[in-house]
Amino acid sequence: MKWWTKVRGFGAETVTELRKVTWPDRKEMRRSIVVVLVGMLLLGIFVSLSDFALYEVVDLLSTWVRGKLGS
């Protein structure tokens, strides 16, 4: 079988499968988008707070080590 025949077969199978899909209505889509946006916001807040806390811990430890070595 030639490669072009395989590609055409794959395309035809893809179209067939996409016709079987149950697509969400507007209400379901809006609800899903809100869930994703809220999740992104919460994850962004978590990453920012973690970054800030780790920075402060490393800064505190380096200040402490510098103080101990300087004495």
Image (spheres, rainbow, N blue to C red):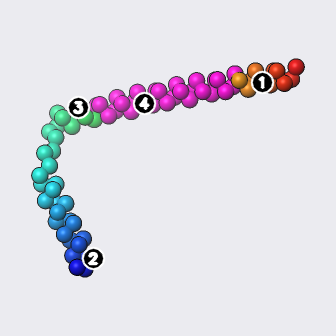
Left or right, 12 with reference to 4 = left
Q: Earlier in the sequence, mark 2 or mark 3?
A: 2
Please report contact status of discs 2 and 1: CB closer than 8 Å, yes or no: no
Residue 44 screen position, x and y as percent: 45, 31
Q: Quadrant of residue 42?
A: top left
Q: Earlier in the sequence, mark 4 or mark 2?
A: 2
Q: Quadrant of residue 23?
A: top left
Quadrant location of the C terminus in the rendered image = top right
Between marks 2 and 3 in the image, the one whose residue lies nearer the viewer: 2
Residue for point 16% across, 40% down: 24
- For numbered disc 4, what is the local secondary structure? helix
Report the residue marked by disc 2: 3
Q: Earlier in the sequence, mark 2 or mark 1?
A: 2
Residue 36 on the magenta segment: yes
Report the residue marked by disc 4: 43
Above-or-below relation of 56 to 4: above
Report the residue marked by disc 3: 31
Residue for point 22% across, 79% down: 1
The type of residue carrying mark 2 is Trp
Residue for point 64% across, 23% down: 57
Report the residue marked by disc 1: 65
The type of residue carrying mark 3 is Arg
From the image, give the main secondary structure of the stretch colored magenta: helix
